[in-house]
Amino acid sequence: MPELPEVEALKDFLTEHLTRHEIVRALPVAISVLKTYDPPLTAVEGREVTAVRRYGKFLALATDGGPHLVTHLARAGWLHWKDPLPSGVPRPGKGPLALRVALETGAGFDLTEAGTQKRLAVYVVADPAQVPGIARLGPDPLAGDFDEARLAELLSGERRRLKGALRDQSLIAGVGNAYSDEILHAARMSPFKLASSLSPEETARLYEALRTTLTDAVERSRGLAAGRLKAEKKTGLRVHGRTGEPCPVCGDTIREVSFSDSSLQYCPTCQTGGKPLADRRLSRLLK
Ligand SMILES: [Zn+2]
Protein backbone atom coordinates (compact mmCIF):
# COMPACT_ATOMS: atom_id res chain seq x y z
CA MET A 1 0.00 0.00 0.00
CA PRO A 2 1.34 3.42 -0.88
CA GLU A 3 1.95 5.57 2.19
CA LEU A 4 3.09 9.17 2.59
CA PRO A 5 6.48 8.83 0.81
CA GLU A 6 5.08 7.02 -2.22
CA VAL A 7 2.07 9.32 -2.52
CA GLU A 8 4.40 12.31 -2.19
CA ALA A 9 6.53 10.93 -5.05
CA LEU A 10 3.41 10.23 -7.12
CA LYS A 11 2.36 13.82 -6.50
CA ASP A 12 5.69 15.08 -7.86
CA PHE A 13 5.50 12.73 -10.83
CA LEU A 14 1.94 13.77 -11.68
CA THR A 15 2.68 17.46 -11.17
CA GLU A 16 5.29 17.14 -13.86
CA HIS A 17 3.19 15.01 -16.22
CA LEU A 18 -0.35 16.36 -15.73
CA THR A 19 -0.26 20.07 -15.01
CA ARG A 20 -1.30 22.29 -17.90
CA HIS A 21 -2.62 19.22 -19.71
CA GLU A 22 -6.27 18.67 -20.49
CA ILE A 23 -8.23 15.67 -19.24
CA VAL A 24 -10.18 14.46 -22.27
CA ARG A 25 -11.74 11.34 -20.74
CA ALA A 26 -12.24 10.01 -17.23
CA LEU A 27 -13.68 6.50 -17.36
CA PRO A 28 -14.82 4.64 -14.25
CA VAL A 29 -14.18 1.06 -15.30
CA ALA A 30 -15.24 -0.29 -11.92
CA ILE A 31 -18.29 1.74 -10.92
CA SER A 32 -17.81 0.95 -7.22
CA VAL A 33 -14.66 3.13 -7.01
CA LEU A 34 -16.65 6.32 -7.48
CA LYS A 35 -17.80 7.54 -4.05
CA THR A 36 -19.52 10.76 -5.16
CA TYR A 37 -22.09 11.46 -7.90
CA ASP A 38 -22.48 15.24 -7.91
CA PRO A 39 -20.61 16.75 -9.70
CA PRO A 40 -20.32 13.83 -12.12
CA LEU A 41 -16.95 12.43 -13.15
CA THR A 42 -17.44 13.95 -16.61
CA ALA A 43 -17.16 17.42 -14.97
CA VAL A 44 -13.34 17.07 -15.08
CA GLU A 45 -13.35 16.36 -18.81
CA GLY A 46 -12.26 19.17 -21.11
CA ARG A 47 -10.41 20.86 -18.24
CA GLU A 48 -6.74 21.46 -17.60
CA VAL A 49 -5.09 20.09 -14.49
CA THR A 50 -3.80 23.10 -12.56
CA ALA A 51 -2.21 21.41 -9.53
CA VAL A 52 -1.63 18.05 -7.87
CA ARG A 53 -1.71 17.93 -4.08
CA ARG A 54 -1.25 15.32 -1.37
CA TYR A 55 -3.41 15.09 1.76
CA GLY A 56 -2.11 12.28 3.95
CA LYS A 57 -2.36 9.28 1.63
CA PHE A 58 -4.89 11.01 -0.67
CA LEU A 59 -3.99 12.53 -4.03
CA ALA A 60 -6.01 15.41 -5.45
CA LEU A 61 -5.94 16.83 -8.97
CA ALA A 62 -7.25 20.38 -9.21
CA THR A 63 -8.83 21.35 -12.53
CA ASP A 64 -9.17 24.77 -14.10
CA GLY A 65 -12.55 26.12 -13.01
CA GLY A 66 -13.82 22.61 -12.31
CA PRO A 67 -13.94 20.11 -9.48
CA HIS A 68 -11.07 18.20 -7.88
CA LEU A 69 -10.49 14.57 -8.74
CA VAL A 70 -9.40 12.90 -5.51
CA THR A 71 -8.22 9.34 -4.99
CA HIS A 72 -7.16 7.07 -2.17
CA LEU A 73 -5.31 4.04 -3.46
CA ALA A 74 -6.00 1.92 -0.34
CA ARG A 75 -4.21 -1.31 0.35
CA ALA A 76 -4.03 -2.91 -3.08
CA GLY A 77 -4.46 0.09 -5.35
CA TRP A 78 -1.86 1.59 -7.65
CA LEU A 79 -1.41 4.22 -10.33
CA HIS A 80 0.08 3.26 -13.69
CA TRP A 81 1.29 5.97 -16.02
CA LYS A 82 0.88 5.07 -19.69
CA ASP A 83 2.30 6.94 -22.64
CA PRO A 84 0.48 6.28 -24.85
CA LEU A 85 -2.64 4.84 -23.23
CA PRO A 86 -3.85 1.71 -25.03
CA SER A 87 -6.49 2.48 -27.62
CA GLY A 88 -10.03 1.15 -27.30
CA VAL A 89 -12.48 1.37 -24.44
CA PRO A 90 -11.64 -0.86 -21.47
CA ARG A 91 -14.30 -3.40 -20.57
CA PRO A 92 -15.76 -3.12 -17.11
CA GLY A 93 -16.04 -6.05 -14.75
CA LYS A 94 -12.89 -8.04 -15.31
CA GLY A 95 -9.36 -7.35 -14.16
CA PRO A 96 -7.85 -4.84 -11.79
CA LEU A 97 -8.51 -1.68 -13.85
CA ALA A 98 -10.70 0.72 -11.85
CA LEU A 99 -10.38 4.14 -13.48
CA ARG A 100 -8.72 5.52 -16.59
CA VAL A 101 -7.82 9.16 -17.15
CA ALA A 102 -6.76 10.22 -20.64
CA LEU A 103 -5.03 13.47 -21.62
CA GLU A 104 -5.14 15.36 -24.89
CA THR A 105 -1.60 14.12 -25.60
CA GLY A 106 -2.69 10.46 -25.76
CA ALA A 107 -0.92 9.71 -22.47
CA GLY A 108 -2.70 9.18 -19.17
CA PHE A 109 -3.00 6.92 -16.17
CA ASP A 110 -4.88 3.90 -14.94
CA LEU A 111 -5.85 3.30 -11.33
CA THR A 112 -5.86 -0.40 -10.60
CA GLU A 113 -6.72 -2.52 -7.62
CA ALA A 114 -5.55 -6.06 -7.09
CA GLY A 115 -7.36 -8.64 -4.98
CA THR A 116 -10.95 -8.98 -3.94
CA GLN A 117 -11.22 -6.30 -1.26
CA LYS A 118 -12.36 -3.28 -3.20
CA ARG A 119 -11.28 -0.23 -1.25
CA LEU A 120 -9.80 2.06 -3.87
CA ALA A 121 -11.84 5.24 -3.81
CA VAL A 122 -12.34 8.15 -6.21
CA TYR A 123 -14.17 11.37 -5.36
CA VAL A 124 -15.18 14.32 -7.52
CA VAL A 125 -15.61 17.32 -5.22
CA ALA A 126 -15.62 21.12 -5.30
CA ASP A 127 -13.22 21.13 -2.34
CA PRO A 128 -10.94 18.26 -1.17
CA ALA A 129 -12.09 18.95 2.42
CA GLN A 130 -15.47 17.51 1.40
CA VAL A 131 -13.89 14.05 1.32
CA PRO A 132 -14.60 12.64 4.81
CA GLY A 133 -11.19 10.92 5.02
CA ILE A 134 -9.43 14.20 4.26
CA ALA A 135 -11.59 16.22 6.69
CA ARG A 136 -10.59 13.81 9.47
CA LEU A 137 -6.82 13.93 8.81
CA GLY A 138 -4.45 14.87 11.59
CA PRO A 139 -1.36 17.03 10.93
CA ASP A 140 1.10 16.10 8.21
CA PRO A 141 4.35 14.89 9.82
CA LEU A 142 6.46 16.55 7.12
CA ALA A 143 4.81 19.95 7.51
CA GLY A 144 7.14 22.74 8.59
CA ASP A 145 5.24 23.36 11.82
CA PHE A 146 5.13 19.70 12.88
CA ASP A 147 7.68 19.89 15.68
CA GLU A 148 8.54 17.81 18.73
CA ALA A 149 6.13 19.77 20.90
CA ARG A 150 3.31 18.96 18.50
CA LEU A 151 4.09 15.25 18.63
CA ALA A 152 4.24 15.34 22.44
CA GLU A 153 0.87 17.06 22.51
CA LEU A 154 -0.68 14.50 20.15
CA LEU A 155 0.59 11.55 22.19
CA SER A 156 -0.08 12.94 25.66
CA GLY A 157 -3.74 11.97 25.87
CA GLU A 158 -3.35 8.90 23.70
CA ARG A 159 -4.45 5.66 25.35
CA ARG A 160 -3.45 3.32 22.54
CA ARG A 161 -0.19 1.54 21.85
CA LEU A 162 2.34 3.28 19.61
CA LYS A 163 1.73 0.98 16.64
CA GLY A 164 -2.00 1.74 16.52
CA ALA A 165 -1.58 5.44 17.29
CA LEU A 166 0.99 6.05 14.53
CA ARG A 167 -1.25 4.39 11.94
CA ASP A 168 -4.31 6.42 12.88
CA GLN A 169 -4.80 8.97 10.09
CA SER A 170 -6.73 11.32 12.36
CA LEU A 171 -3.75 11.52 14.75
CA ILE A 172 -0.93 11.82 12.15
CA ALA A 173 -1.62 11.85 8.41
CA GLY A 174 0.09 9.52 5.97
CA VAL A 175 1.77 6.81 8.07
CA GLY A 176 0.51 3.27 7.51
CA ASN A 177 1.44 -0.26 8.46
CA ALA A 178 4.86 -0.33 6.78
CA TYR A 179 6.28 3.02 7.88
CA SER A 180 4.96 2.69 11.45
CA ASP A 181 7.10 -0.49 11.73
CA GLU A 182 10.07 1.35 10.27
CA ILE A 183 9.67 4.39 12.53
CA LEU A 184 9.39 2.26 15.68
CA HIS A 185 12.46 0.25 14.68
CA ALA A 186 14.44 3.45 14.08
CA ALA A 187 13.23 4.81 17.44
CA ARG A 188 14.11 1.48 19.18
CA MET A 189 10.63 1.23 20.72
CA SER A 190 8.19 -1.59 21.21
CA PRO A 191 5.12 -1.37 18.98
CA PHE A 192 3.06 -2.17 22.09
CA LYS A 193 4.46 0.65 24.21
CA LEU A 194 1.70 2.95 25.47
CA ALA A 195 1.74 6.15 23.44
CA SER A 196 1.10 8.35 26.46
CA SER A 197 3.95 6.78 28.46
CA LEU A 198 6.84 8.38 26.55
CA SER A 199 9.42 10.39 28.48
CA PRO A 200 10.62 13.68 26.92
CA GLU A 201 13.78 11.88 25.77
CA GLU A 202 11.71 9.12 24.14
CA THR A 203 9.41 11.65 22.48
CA ALA A 204 12.48 13.34 21.01
CA ARG A 205 13.75 9.97 19.74
CA LEU A 206 10.39 9.08 18.20
CA TYR A 207 10.12 12.50 16.58
CA GLU A 208 13.58 12.16 15.07
CA ALA A 209 12.77 8.63 13.81
CA LEU A 210 9.46 9.78 12.33
CA ARG A 211 10.94 12.70 10.42
CA THR A 212 14.10 10.89 9.29
CA THR A 213 12.33 7.70 8.17
CA LEU A 214 9.74 9.58 6.13
CA THR A 215 12.16 12.16 4.72
CA ASP A 216 14.64 9.47 3.65
CA ALA A 217 11.86 7.47 1.98
CA VAL A 218 10.61 10.56 0.15
CA GLU A 219 14.16 11.30 -1.03
CA ARG A 220 14.61 7.75 -2.32
CA SER A 221 11.27 7.85 -4.15
CA ARG A 222 11.53 11.35 -5.56
CA GLY A 223 12.11 11.49 -9.28
CA LEU A 224 11.22 7.82 -9.80
CA ALA A 225 8.63 6.95 -12.40
CA ALA A 226 5.28 5.86 -10.97
CA GLY A 227 5.95 2.28 -12.02
CA ARG A 228 9.11 1.96 -9.94
CA LEU A 229 7.81 3.27 -6.63
CA LYS A 230 6.48 -0.02 -5.32
CA ALA A 231 9.82 -1.80 -5.76
CA GLU A 232 11.69 1.14 -4.23
CA LYS A 233 9.44 1.14 -1.17
CA LYS A 234 10.11 -2.57 -0.60
CA THR A 235 13.87 -2.21 -1.02
CA GLY A 236 14.05 0.66 1.45
CA LEU A 237 12.19 -1.09 4.30
CA ARG A 238 14.44 -2.39 7.08
CA VAL A 239 12.02 -4.51 9.15
CA HIS A 240 8.57 -4.33 7.62
CA GLY A 241 7.80 -7.45 5.58
CA ARG A 242 11.17 -8.97 6.55
CA THR A 243 10.20 -11.65 9.07
CA GLY A 244 13.05 -14.14 9.52
CA GLU A 245 15.69 -11.88 7.99
CA PRO A 246 18.52 -10.38 10.04
CA CYS A 247 18.03 -6.90 11.50
CA PRO A 248 20.28 -4.52 9.53
CA VAL A 249 21.28 -2.80 12.79
CA CYS A 250 22.07 -5.67 15.19
CA GLY A 251 21.72 -8.91 13.21
CA ASP A 252 18.98 -10.39 15.43
CA THR A 253 16.17 -12.19 13.61
CA ILE A 254 13.22 -9.97 12.70
CA ARG A 255 9.98 -11.29 14.16
CA GLU A 256 6.34 -10.66 13.51
CA VAL A 257 3.02 -10.40 15.29
CA SER A 258 0.00 -11.35 13.20
CA PHE A 259 -3.46 -9.92 13.42
CA SER A 260 -6.59 -10.95 11.55
CA ASP A 261 -5.95 -8.62 8.61
CA SER A 262 -2.35 -7.45 8.98
CA SER A 263 0.94 -8.14 10.69
CA LEU A 264 3.72 -6.09 12.20
CA GLN A 265 7.45 -6.74 12.18
CA TYR A 266 10.05 -5.71 14.75
CA CYS A 267 13.51 -6.55 16.05
CA PRO A 268 13.52 -7.95 19.61
CA THR A 269 17.06 -6.78 20.39
CA CYS A 270 16.53 -3.22 19.09
CA GLN A 271 12.96 -2.76 20.29
CA THR A 272 11.77 -5.02 23.09
CA GLY A 273 14.81 -5.66 25.28
CA GLY A 274 15.46 -8.97 23.51
CA LYS A 275 12.06 -10.40 24.44
CA PRO A 276 9.84 -11.68 21.63
CA LEU A 277 6.30 -10.31 21.74
CA ALA A 278 3.45 -12.80 22.01
CA ASP A 279 1.98 -13.52 18.62
CA ARG A 280 -1.70 -13.32 19.41
CA ARG A 281 -2.87 -15.35 16.45
CA LEU A 282 -0.32 -18.05 17.09
CA SER A 283 -1.03 -18.21 20.82
CA ARG A 284 -4.73 -18.52 20.14
CA LEU A 285 -4.08 -21.42 17.81
CA LEU A 286 -1.91 -23.16 20.39
CA LYS A 287 -4.47 -22.93 23.19
ZN1 LIG B 1 18.01 -5.05 15.65
Image: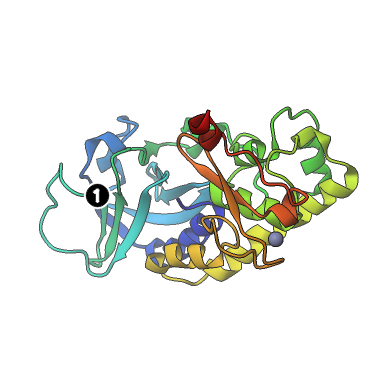
Q: Which residue is mark 1?
A: 96
* Residue 37 locus on image (x, y percent): 30, 30
Q: Is residue 142 visible?
A: no
Residue 141, compared with residue 16, is above or below; it is: above
**Residue closer to the observer: 220 or 139:** 220
Q: Secondary structure at mark 1?
A: loop
Residue at 84 percent of width and 47 percent of height:
202
Residue 214, compared with residue 71, is above or below; it is: below
Left or right of residue 129: residue 25: left
Left or right of residue 129: residue 165: right
**Residue closer to the observer: 47 or 84:** 84
Inspect the image, locate mark 1, and give the three-letter code of the amino acid beneath it: Pro
Residue at the right extreme of this rendering: 200
* Residue 283 locus on image (x, y percent): 55, 34
**Residue closer to the observer: 104 or 215:** 215
* Residue 178 locus on image (x, y percent): 55, 51
